[in-house]
Image (spheres, grey):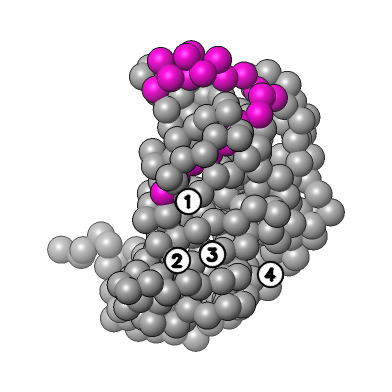
Amino acid sequence: MTDKKTALAGLKGEVFLLTEQHKSFASAQIELLAAIDDCGSISKAAKQVGISYKTAWDRIDAMNNMSAQPLVVRSTGGAQGGGTLLTELGHRVISGFQSLQEEHRKFIERLGDKLHTLNDIAGFMRSESMKTSARNQFRGTVSNITFGAVNAEVELDIGTNQSIIAMITQESVELLALNKGCDVVALIKASSVILSTDTGVITSARNKLVGTISRLLPGAVNTDVTLDIGGGKSVSAIITNISATELALEVGNKACALFKAPSVILLRDE
């Protein structure tokens, strides 16, 4: 009996757009950008590509946070958002990526015609891309490293006139080969972020990102809050509905996101 998985083995490939050795864009992101360009609306674009409204916003925030310049700009207009437009960079990314996809498709077809032992190598070629559950991802540059007796404080410039501080071990600094000027990615879980409407508040948390509430998505128990911190970047927090009510959160209000330095995880590509 023929194994179904073996019978379906074939040569496939996927294109990723890399920026300074970081995987920045793949087909799912480009598909969403193209839909936004077509629809001019997040809700309509999400429906067109078959994802939820919340997932669409998450992808947009992630793309803007991981890009030196915004790819998408929007004006908030209630629960479903206002008009949404691609920037010039967003249009260039779509055009370039689609050209790459077409050339890649032709290459795969030519290569597939020459291979006769795909079933033998299918298992060897199978791999998974790294995924993370952290909602907040920021690419930035190490601007300073302060060493202590055991740990080190790493300051990261994320390009918004605000910085992120991470507390990691000195061993981790050496393992990641961190130094001033190198590029890293900072991960912060939304559940680790505390919100305050007092932007002048002083706490023991080393990180305070000040911005404007751009989106509120209430659920059965929690509310997903997105804070626009400038430069096309944003930070997300998950708080209880009770907290959202007590803080009287509204889109357009000023607020700050607080999180401790040990809550920040740093990643660096080799």
Quadrant assignment, res 229: top right
Please tell me whether mark 3 sits on a helix, a strand or a loop.
strand
Is the residue 197 above or below the residue 87 in the image? above
Residue 85 percent coordinates (x, y): 79, 40
Helix, strand or loop under label 4: helix
- Check disc 2 and report the residue beneath it: 153
Name the residue: 54% across, 56% down.
Answer: 164
Residue 253 falls within the magenta-colored stretch: yes
Residue at 43% over, 19% down: 243
Find residue 100 and name its label: 4
> In the rendered image, which quarter contains the N terminus?
bottom left
The answer to the question of whether label 3 and label 1 lie on touching residues, with beta carbons closer than 8 A, is no
Please state the horizontal and vertical placement of residue 133, each as a whole percent of the image.
Answer: 38, 49
Amino acid type, label 2 = Glu
State the CA–CA distance, disc 2 to disc 4: 40 Å
Contact, mark 3 vs mark 2 (Cβ under 8 Å): yes
Per the image, is 45 magenta? no
State the image quarter where residue 107 is shown. Answer: bottom right
Q: Which amino acid does label 4 sit on?
A: Leu
List the residue tagged with mark 1. 206
Q: Give the range drawn in magenta.
A: 240-260
Pointer 4 or 1: first along the chain? 4
Of tags 4 and 1, which is closer to the observer? 1
Residue at 55% from the left image edge and 15% from the top image edge: 248
Q: Is residue 42 above or below residue 6?
A: above
Q: Earlier in the sequence, mark 3 or mark 1?
A: 3
Of the residues shown, which amino acid type is indicated by label 3? Answer: Glu
37 relative to 263, above or below: above
Mark pair 3, 1: CA separation: 10 Å
User: Mark 4 or mark 3, which is nearer the start of the sequence?
Assistant: 4
User: Do the numbered discs 1 and 2 sit on residues whose CB atoms are within 8 Å?
Assistant: yes
Where residue 125 is drawn, which disc sits there? none
